């Protein structure tokens, strides 16, 4: 079993990410530290293949030809294998941090799985699909640990003036 | 025509609000002066009002999640102060309820802390409505009369029809024991029920899967009410569908052809009548 991450982004400006960034900077005091905020639809594809290379090829086929994940008129996409994630490095004191937000009551993309397995003939190759939203931040901080801590503060809503991207009463989060 | 010495509410209009005019009409029919107040006006002007309404719609296009971007605006911070420090009433309807929950005013055990969510409608395979859901439901007034200032004109156990229209309306929490505490403190104002007032957790009765069938909650002080259904859309007999049957459907049928009878109050008017009464002491004091 191989797991491939599929990240789907808008080609046009993402107004949700822009609005979230504006709220964090202008209303919540993160103007100095939040250098960039983008967003992607996140899918974890659990694939029954014998190698990571064949898993990546299958994931590309799913992204390109099923119309379930990517509309080429408005989306770009990126595939990531488990071994491809490198340790984040700083550029002039700015650190990349990813926050994955999922539904706390279940991450399974039921309808997509159903379509892949029952309608599109991938029953044997696709073991499962999970989904969420990936927030991709660039955070100015002294070190990566601090950047991750700031990212979590920005993300998790605890009070009216604390946190924006996750309501922990129905969502889960992970700092990747 | 509303009297010029009537109590005044500010109906806060965010980019994406879309129910302000019918809410204003329902409030004015109850004798309230209702000014539509744009979110980017000087927030200090809110102090001139006796109370507030946040109506339905999609503030900021529901970006990130319903209501949350609006809560970061200075106008909400000012309203928060007016409500928690001055005790002014606020009614949040649908998107307004989402704003009040994300602002930590509801359930308000620790004002400002976010203790609940209005999560997406429950997607279960048993046929529960999912995604955006628009239909008439029945509510039971589940708290003692007078517990919530904004339902003081409604008898306890009153059952009434009202429409819902939302995709994220499921009251839920991961705070242990919170629902029990809300029951104990009678903060559960409205519950989804059938036409006879039976509160059961079935897809037909509880359309979004809310915990304890909650459709509306008040804060401990009773001056804040967040409700997902739309009382402004059930404030005149003309708005009620004949298909409701029973007494309200019959009233609509009887009103057919009569402008006056069609303009008579519907069941949702009781919420605005209660709001008017909640506003009066503030007016007198001011």
Image (spheres, rainbow, N blue to C red):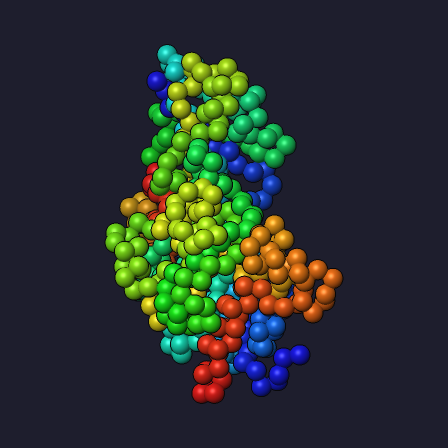
- Along the viewing direction, whichever of B108 and A79 lies nearer the viewer: B108
- Asked whether residue B50 appears in the rendered view, the answer is yes
- State the residue in front, B4 or B140: B140
In which quadrant will I find the N terminus of chain B? bottom right
Where residue B198 appears, as percent x and y from the top left, is 40, 51
Q: Is residue A120 found left or right of A34 in the rendered image? A: right
Is A75 placed above or below B33 here? above
Residue A162 in percent (x, y) is at: 37, 58
Residue B139 at x, y percent in the picture: 46, 56
Q: Is residue A176 above or below residue B80?
A: above
User: Would you say residue A35 is visible in this rendering?
Assistant: no
Name the quadrant containing residue B281: bottom left
Is B135 located above or below residue B232 in the figure?
above
Return the x and y of residue B23 as percentages of the image width and height. Answer: 59, 65
Query: Could you say which quadrant of the image residue A80 lies in?
Result: top left
Residue at figure coordinates x 64%, y 59% from the top left: B252
Considering only vertical position in the picture, is A117 above or below A150?
Answer: above
Kindly identify the residue that appears in the image at 45 percent across and 87 percent down.
Answer: B285
The residue depicted at 66 percent of the width and 57 percent of the height is B253
Q: Residue furthest right?
A: B257
In the picture as drawn, the residue positioned furthest to the top comes out as: A50
- Label count reads 0
Instruction: Report the residue at 52% width, 78% height from top.
Output: B49
Q: Nearer the viewer, residue B56 or B148?
A: B148
């Amino acid at each position: 079993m191989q797991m491939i991450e599929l990240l789907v982004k808008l080609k046009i400006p993402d107004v949700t990410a822009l609005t979230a960034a504006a709220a964090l900077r202008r209303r919540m005091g993160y103007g100095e530290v939040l250098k960039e905020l983008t967003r992607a639809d996140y899918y974890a594809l659990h694939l029954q293949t014998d190698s990571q290379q064949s898993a990546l090829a299958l994931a590309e086929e799913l992204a390109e030809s099923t119309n379930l994940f990517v509309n080429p008129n408005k989306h770009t996409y990126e595939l990531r294998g488990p071994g491809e994630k490198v340790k984040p490095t700083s550029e002039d004191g700015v650190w990349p941090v990813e926050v994955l937000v999922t539904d706390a009551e279940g991450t399974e993309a039921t309808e997509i799985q159903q379509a892949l397995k029952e309608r599109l003939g991938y029953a044997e190759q696709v073991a499962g699909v999970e989904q969420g939203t990936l927030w991709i931040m660039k955070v100015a901080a002294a070190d990566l640990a601090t950047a991750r801590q700031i990212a979590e503060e920005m993300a998790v809503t605890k009070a009216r003036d604390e946190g924006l991207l996750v309501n922990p009463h129905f969502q889960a989060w992970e700092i990747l | 025509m509303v009297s010029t010495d009537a109590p005044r509410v500010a109906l806060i209009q965010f980019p994406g609000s879309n129910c302000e005019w019918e809410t204003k009409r329902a409030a004015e029919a109850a004798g309230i002066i209702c000014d539509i107040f744009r979110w980017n006006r000087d927030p200090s002007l809110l102090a001139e009002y006796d109370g507030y309404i946040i109506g339905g719609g999609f503030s900021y296009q529901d970006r990130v999640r319903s209501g949350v971007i609006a809560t970061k605006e200075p106008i909400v911070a000012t309203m928060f102060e007016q409500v928690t420090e001055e005790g002014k009433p606020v009614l949040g309807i649908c998107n307004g309820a989402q704003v009040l929950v994300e602002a930590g005013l509801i359930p308000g055990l620790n004002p400002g802390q976010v203790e609940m969510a209005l999560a997406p409608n429950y997607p279960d395979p048993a046929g529960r409505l999912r995604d955006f859901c628009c239909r008439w439901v029945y509510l039971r007034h589940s708290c003692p009369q007078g517990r919530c200032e904004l339902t003081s004109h409604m008898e306890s156990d009153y059952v009434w029809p009202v429409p819902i229209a939302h995709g994220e309306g499921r009251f839920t929490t991961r705070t242990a024991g919170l629902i029990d505490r809300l029951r104990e403190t009678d903060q559960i104002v409205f519950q989804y029920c059938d036409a006879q007032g039976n509160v059961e957790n079935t897809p037909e009765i509880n359309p979004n899967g809310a915990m304890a069938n909650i459709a509306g909650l008040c804060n401990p002080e009773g001056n804040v009410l967040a409700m997902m259904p739309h009382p402004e859309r059930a404030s005149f007999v003309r708005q009620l569908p004949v298909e409701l049957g029973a007494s309200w459907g019959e009233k609509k049928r009887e009103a057919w052809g009569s402008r006056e009878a069609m303009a008579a109050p519907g069941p949702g008017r009781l919420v605005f009548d209660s709001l008017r009464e909640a506003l009066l002491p503030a007016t007198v004091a001011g």
